[in-house]
Amino acid sequence: MKAQIKLFRIWGIQIGLHYSWLLIALLVVLSLAGRFEATNPQWGTNVVWAVAILTSLLFFAAIVLHELSHAAIARVRGLPVKSITLFALGGVAQIEKEASDPKTEFWMGIVGPITSALIGGLCLMAAALMGWDPAARHQSPPLAMLVWLGIINIALAVFNMVPGFPLDGGRVLRAIVWWITGNSDRATRIAATTGQGIAFVFIIVGLFRFFNGAGFGGLWLTFIGWFLLDAARSSYAQTEILKHLRGVRVRDVMTHDWPAIDSQTNLQTFVDEHLLRSGHRNFAVRDNGRVAGLITPHEVKDIDRMRWQQMTVGEAMVPLDRLHGVKPATQVTEALEKMGREDVNQLVVLSNSHLDGIVSRGNILRLLQTRAELGR
Ligand SMILES: [Zn+2]
């Protein structure tokens, strides 16, 4: 999930919004306004809308806090966290590595629901201190806000503890099975299967409620179930892939025979006679007989076409020392994580700061295809 709207950074973690969030934010504001209008008509229209908008903002802040708690545990356990993105169904913290032991997985999973439950509990406690009377017909704006935030955060904590992967409860279940059996693959399989089962229940209950007149609420449940089903499947597929790649090193999949180009060649010639003719994408740039850098279509497309005649490949390339490199002995899974983290499709393989090869997502994909074809 990539954020399309970037907001700000906390501890170096980019907080952002996915477009789908805008829709849900609108729905939350509208439904809150409708609810406050119905329960507290004495507030007047302006106050109703102001309270609805403020409550929604605090609700999304609480979701960010929930995700930040996952991120904090990940950080403490040495797992890098790149970003937190809010989307239609909540938040997602992009943690760049899988937990390497069940304890980390357990705490990383359970801290989110604990955080939401704490926030909810604090809101309700504050409401109680302000004299909250659940039987009262009308409420003051701060009280209505605190009560709603309290209940929704506790509901979030409960929903997240549903033991279906990839919900937090699924992670916790996976961690416990992993802890007991000592087998992370088996734990993933069990958590993913449970997740799919729960997703089916959501879909069926949602459809049942929809056809019994529950309307949007029923469809919403079905939609969440469908999302969970998809997420459980793909996280399972991902661990299957990682299983196939375990033990494979970069040197086993990297290419050695990449085409070379002289650094004095101008970009126009490079594009017309090399890039568009050979089918290769990565070119090593040679300068006085040694490899000085790498050039790919990515570097060329950012340069104005009018300048292609004057500019040389040597000027446009990414120099060797600025390239993201891995060692031949690096695990392929680690190389994939690095590509994801740095948002690139290939890495150069460097041994003693000289270019040894190139490893790309394509190389790794072909290896997986071959292994799947041969059933290995
Ligand atoms: Zn969570």
Image (cartoon, helix red, strand yellow):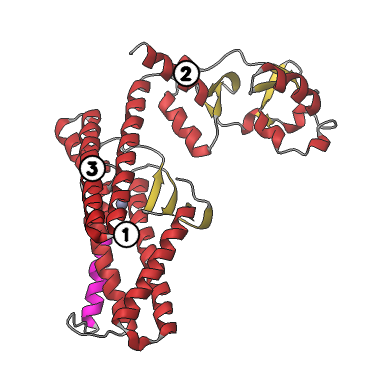
Indicate the amino acid at tag 2.
Answer: Arg
Residue ranking furthest to the top: 374
Residue ranking furthest to the left: 180
Please, is residue 245 above or below residue 193 in the view? above
Query: Can you tell which of label 2 and label 1 is closer to the viewer?
Result: 1
Q: Residues within 10 Å of mark 3 (few under 14, many from 20)?
A: some
Q: Nearer the viewer, residue 224 or 83?
A: 224
Q: Indicate the quadrant where residue 356 lies.
A: top right
- On whether residue 124 falls in the magenta region, the answer is yes
Indicate the amino acid at tag 1.
Answer: Phe
Q: Position of residue 166 (x, y in %)?
A: 29, 43
Residue at figure coordinates x 55%, y 27% from the top left: 347
* Dot placed on the residue nearer the N-terminal end, 1 or 3: 3
Residue underneath mark 3:
200
Badge number at residue 229 = none
Q: Position of residue 167 (x, y in %)?
A: 28, 47
Residue range highlighted in magenta: 116-129
Q: Residues within 10 Å of mark 1 (few under 14, many from 20)?
A: few
Q: Position of residue 85 (x, y in %)?
A: 44, 52
Task: Tell me whether circle 1 and circle 3 mark residues in contact (CB < 8 Å).
Answer: no
Work out how far the residue at label 1 is from the one at label 3, CA to CA, in angstroms.
18 Å
Question: Seen in the image, is 20 located left or right of residue 351?
Answer: left
Image quadrant for the N terminus?
Answer: top left
Q: Nearer the viewer, residue 201 or 12?
A: 201
Residue 236 seen in this snapshot:
yes
Work out how far the residue at label 2 is from the one at label 3, CA to CA, in angstroms.
34 Å
* Dot placed on the residue nearer the N-terminal end, 2 or 3: 3
Indicate the amino acid at tag 3.
Answer: Phe
Please identify the dominant SS of the magenta region. Answer: helix
Residue underneath mark 1:
216
Query: Can you tell which of label 2 and label 3 is closer to the viewer?
Result: 3
Residue underneath mark 2:
366
